[in-house]
Amino acid sequence: MASPSFIRNVILKALLLFLLVNLVFAALDPLPAIGRLSAYNHIFPGRVRLPYGDKPDQAYNLSLFNLPAMFASHELGAKPKTKDEFRLVLIGDSSVWGFLLKPNQTLSAYLNAAKLTAPDGRPVRVYNVGYPTMSLTKDLLMLDEAMHYQPDMVVWLVTLESFPYDKQLSSPILQHNPKPLQDLIRTYSLKLNPDDPALTKTTSWGKTILGERRALADILRLQLYGILWAATGIDQYYPETYEPPQKDLATDETFHGLKPPQLYESDLAFDVLKAGVQRMGAVPILIVNEPVYLSSGQNSNIRYNFFYPRWAYDQYRQLMTQASHANGWNYLDLWNIIPADEFTNSAIHLTPSGTETLADKVGEAISLIIENSGAVGNGSNNP
Amino acid sequence: MTLTHILVFCIITVLLIWIGRGRWRGWLLLVASVLAIYWLQPSTPIRNLDFWLPTASVGLVVLVWAATRPGETIVQRQDLITSGVMAGLILVIALTRYFDPLCCLTPTRPPALPLVIAALGGVTLVAIVTIRLSPKNLRLDALYIMMILAIFLVLKTPALAQATSGGLRTISGQVAGLATPLDLRWLGFSYLAFRLIHTLRDRVSGKLPGLSLMDFTTYAIFFPAVTAGPIDRVQRFSGDLQKMQAAIIPNNPSEKSTKNYQAILSPISLSWQDAYEGGQRILLGVFKKFVVADSLAIIALNGTNAAQTTSTGWMWVLVYAYSLRLYLDFSGYTDIAIGLGRLVGIRLPENFDNPYLKPNLTAFWNSWHITLAQWFRSYFFNPVTRSLRMNPRNFPLPAIIFVGQLSTMVLIGLWHGVTWNFAAWGLWQGIGLFIHNRWSEATRTRFSELDIHPGFKSAMTISGILLTFNYVTIGWVWFALPTLSSSWHVLLMLFGIR
């Protein structure tokens, strides 16, 4: 028979145990370690792109902020690199990730389908480490994490919208990973505030199980959605219709508060780009200025598209060319290679055939760099 | 029920025990139950329907009570007070429409007060007529059963539900073309219908005790069990209710002993065992429903992923996930209901007894949704098989069992919704039960000697559990999916045919 004292003792012990477990959890901060425990690549196949999505029940995918968990769910984490593999990693924004594209229609998928080989005969295996949101610092964070997987080469696709300083810390993935971000800022002396108010502050309470309940639930959900990913091969919600890129444009000539006529290198986060190249060390890198939608509608003499006034974009291209020459980067400017009707819902998102065209060009450049690895760093527009 | 609902109900039950004394405890339980059906009612796109549906539940309970009460007795003062209290509660809920800070217990703003008063007046009038007519043996019970079944049919038949929704939308000045079958979400109507039909049938067979309106209403809409059962029997429930109130007001004034009055006036001590076991059941239920079942829901078979899945192996995973999710979800809710009941001293019946560990389908159906199966056994299967057995044409026993089991299971299927898929699920279960019945009949003597061998017995039990679980799980494919073609697609894929 339960007596009042027995029930009281049960409640007190439960509370005490709960408190103790929470304190130990907060002290150990095991979330990164928990994130590495993944059923992906063991029970079900790794994802071909990083987890991202806001309609998990339809996309079988979700956005979370635990970098180790994200990479552990990726096919990149399947096994250590073997001698038989030339590992190539793609970094970039949603156009690299493959917004509105099926897993077999992304840039990495087309590059893999091209069956590129290294001079020593190793097949080039391309991994998609692109992640939506436009920020070079976000790309740097992904690159830093991807470097643990020993890539033989990195292709970094960039666009002007990733360069402004006000965009650098706007990505939620950065804001929720203040520690690795602050390490990067300090290591590479980036012109960013490591104590930026946009970065989440972790309190003692926030480190407990209760405080981290959302992060823990996300890790669990990521594992569960892995089953549906394996069962269906679907990792994105595809709306039946979407708005095409804006054709008729505003007369506004400003770009992130910058006004014509002059765009300076110091206006853009070239320090982050340089940090990325520095982080790569001896690993070859190809920087690609990704294709953008070129409008022919109203005010297209002022702006190329929704994102870019012509003056800013033209000068950005010049600055990129100068920087690549100065720093000896492999740089490929593909800004205008895709016709306007090959864009889907934004000025940077491509259709499958547009992506295939892009893959052809990037593939050629990759082959050249691999073959002429001694020529790395020639700084030309066409490697 | 959400976690917030459960937490509030836990607080209410504890307050009910601490504050409520004697008969007051019954009143508090009634008030809590009436308020709960308004609070739990999901919103509907039809204007004010989320107020009218719980009001209709209360109205229906009052009318059925009027039809089932002993015809020869006069209406007691307490029954009049109860109806007054319920009407008052409904008016207070309606009045919140005019007090923005208090609005609203219902998901949307209640209708205008004159409409509510008119509706209450209408119910009162019909109740008075029912009470007047009940001694005249006019088979009002049959009329009310027909009415309940008609409502049920409308709610569960997609085409009828859509047409009704269209009509209601027109009445409320909304666009009828936007009507969908999902518009008519009447909280707990199925369970209410089972309870009311049970009282109506037991009234005819003379098994229904005389019940006060308060006890009858509390039984019909007892808040822990209003959403997902179990379907208690009124005879058992009212016994617990009397014990909970710990005092039976004597009908005969000469029975008014000092002891009885002491019981009425003194606080009743909380049974710590009930509190402990009730709390444990609630925690278990919360874990089963909100941790395990809701996680499994992510990967459980549904209409969308059934069409997207590309391999046999993963299809089995989704189907098993659905099977486990369904059990844990439903039994989790039952645990919560039973636990909340225990906290106030009401011992609701068990609804599950490890059904997936049963060695045959008959045992499964004796342990899955037990109260529903018992209800159908009492009010459908037994009467049907009895009438077939007594039929002068002398039907063979297997035929009687076949018809009885098949029709019962198809009816249970249709209770979930009048669709081909639920009918197919019922057929699957009915055929399975019949096959098991014939198999056990045929093998009873043949295996009786081998049964002595413990190894054989264990092997048979384990094989039986696996076979039963898989048979039931495959059957859920009909249950989970909206169309026969999608179910057929999944079944073919499960066996590697597609």
Image (cartoon, coloured by chain):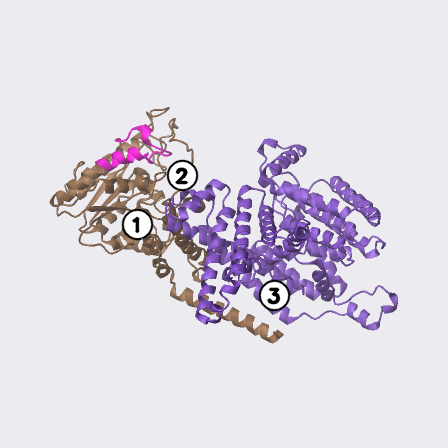
Chain colours: A brown, B purple
Magenta span has A164? no
Q: Nearer the viewer, residue A125 or B369?
A: B369
Q: In the rendered image, which residue does mark 3 sit on?
A: B278
x then y, percent, for residue B7: 59, 59
| C-alpha distance separating marks 3 and 2 | 47 Å
Placement of B32 over or under A263, stated as above or below: below
Task: Name the N-terminal-most of marks 1 and 2.
Answer: 1
**Which amino acid is tagged 3?**
Gly
Is residue A273 something one can see in this rendering?
Answer: yes
Placement of B322 over or under A348, stated as above or below: below
Q: In the rendered image, which residue does mark 2 sit on?
A: A238
Q: Judge from the rendering whether residue B446 lies leftward or rightward of residue B382; answer left or right.
A: left
| Circle 3 chain | B
**Which amino acid is tagged 2?**
Tyr
Helix, strand or loop for disc 1: helix
Q: Which mark is residue A142?
A: 1
